[in-house]
Image (cartoon, rainbow, N blue to C red):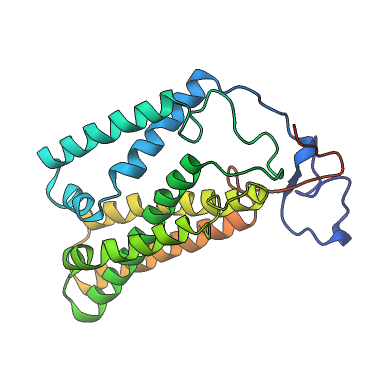
Amino acid sequence: MSYNGGLHPARPPEHGFKIPIEFASDRKIRYRNKIAYRFAHWPIWIWVFFIAPGPLTFDLFDTGFDQRMAAWLGAVVLFTGIAGLCGRLPGVEPHPYIIRFTEDRPNPLYRRVCYTFAWSAVVTFVLLNVIGFIVAVLTGQWYLRYMYEVAYFPIAIVIWIFGGLGLLPRVRRSTKGEGHERRYFYGSAWAVCLAHPVVWFLWAVLPTSRAGDALMLLTFVGILGFVGWLSYRGKLPRTRVIFPGELAVSD
């Protein structure tokens, strides 16, 4: 199916769609997940749960890998591996749970738990790092370790509660909003995965100073904003809007 300027050919510009869209009825249906596809998703969830204890993750990047992290990583690999073998890990299931992105199906508990922890990682790390940069620029002192120790889990627990109540994208009780909600998730994931490595590099090469801290803050926020804009425009993988379309049916 070809698109004219990112707009569906059956929908001219006057219909108001300003960003690239897809219709569920146009998408090729995949009934099985290939082995390579399943193995490619497993490390994603290993990482999501491995970094869940934020203060431990802070120590990882501050002082390096140690026995605590090795033990925690081993536990995460074991339990996510079992979940994957049982088909209870998103993307690692033998068969896709969501056939049509717009159909109204119950959202399984394992998906809701996994995406809740993923949102927790995205929101909590970004929020604390931005605040840490701002404090460093204003005071000339770094309090990020202390902030992670006292604030990480209170913030994460709030996100977990929101997930438990079904108030987060991809964590709702029904999958009918998946065509829109996945955009928010992948857009956030792309932004975080690009912004953090760049800032870690700058951290390593820039001299310690308020000017350097300000540059890192502006770079971090700038990348988040730019990638977020690209995601909103549907320019990044898995960020296009998916509408039901006239022929969309539930399988």
- Relative to 85, is 136 above or below? below
Instruction: Please identify the quarter of the rendering in which residue 97 is found.
Output: top right
* Quadrant housing the N terminus: top right
Q: Is 183 placed above or below 91 here?
A: below
Instruction: Tell whether 56 sits left or right of 188.
Output: left
Q: Quadrant of residue 123?
A: bottom left
Residue 73 lies, in percent from the top left, at 23, 36
Q: Residue at x 46, y 40 (%)?
A: 110
The spot of residue 113 in percent (x, y) is: 44, 46
Quadrant where the image shows the C terminus: top right
One can see residue 66 in this view: no
Please give left or right for residue 161 compared with residue 11 in the image. Answer: left
Quadrant of the rendered structure where residue 105 is?
top right
Residue 168 seen by the camera: yes
Residue extending furthest toward the top: 35
At 86% from the left and 45% from the top, the residue drawn is 9
Where 27 falls versus 132 (above or below)?
above
Q: Nearer the viewer, residue 153 or 105?
A: 105
> Which x, y percent locates residue 45?
39, 38
Residue at (21% x, 54% y) in the render: 58
Placement of 133 over or under 78, stated as above or below? below
Left of 223 or right of it: where is 145? left
Count of numbered marks: 0
Residue occupying the point 71% across, 45% down? 102
Residue 179 x/y as whole percent: 67, 48
